[in-house]
Image (cartoon, rainbow, N blue to C red):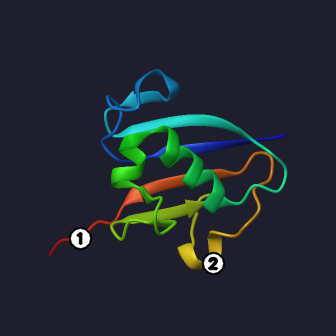
Amino acid sequence: MNQVTIELWLWLGHELKNDFECPSEMRSIKIENVEDGTTIRKLLSDLAGRYPPISTRVFDIEIQNLYPDVVINYNDRVINPHEVYDRILKDGDKITLIPLAGGG
C-alpha cells in the first residue's frame, strides 16, 4: 500500500466535505492510500467516482481524461497528461491539479 497526496487548486473546498483538508476555499488536500500498481489514471478515475465535483470539473470518467481546463502537476513538475496517466504511483508521490490560467 502506498500513500499519495492529492492537492486540488480548484474552488471545491465546500463541496468535497470532510474527506479533504481545506486550508482555503481554493485548496483541498487528501492523503489517499492506493494499492501497489495503481496508475494516476486509476487514482483520478476512483476519485471522480467517489466525489461528483471531481467528476464534473476535474476528471471525465467516461473518456478517462482530465477536462481540458485542468493541468496536472506530478511531484511538483508540470507533465503532459498523456505521459503521466499510465505512470504507476509510488509511496510519497504528490498529484496537484490546477486550473489552466488564461488571460491577456
Residue at 71% over, 51% down: 93
Work out whether residue 48 or residue 81 is closer to the camera in this orientation and state it: 48
Residue at the limit of the structure toward the top, as seen here: 18
Residue at 69% over, 70% down: 86
Q: What is the distance, in whole Å, between disc 1 and disc 2 at their CAs?
A: 23 Å
Above or below, 103 against 91 in this view is below
Quarter of the rendering occupied by the N terminus: top right
Above or below, 38 against 83 in this view is above
Left or right? Give the position of 49 relative to 90.
left
The amino acid pointed to by label 1 is: Gly
> Is tag 1's residue or tag 2's residue first in the polypeptide sequence?
2
User: Where residue 31 appears, x then y in whole percent?
Assistant: 64, 35
Residue at the limit of the structure toward the left, as seen here: 104
Residue at 31% over, 33% down: 25
Q: Can residue 75 be seen from the camera position used here?
A: no
Quarter of the rendering occupied by the C terminus: bottom left
User: Where residue 87 appears, x then y in whole percent?
Assistant: 72, 67
Q: How many numbered circles does the render carry?
A: 2
Residue at the limit of the structure toward the front, as seen here: 62
User: Where residue 22 appears, x then y in whole percent?
Assistant: 42, 29
The amino acid pointed to by label 2 is: Glu
Residue indicated by mark 2: 83
Residue indicated by mark 1: 102
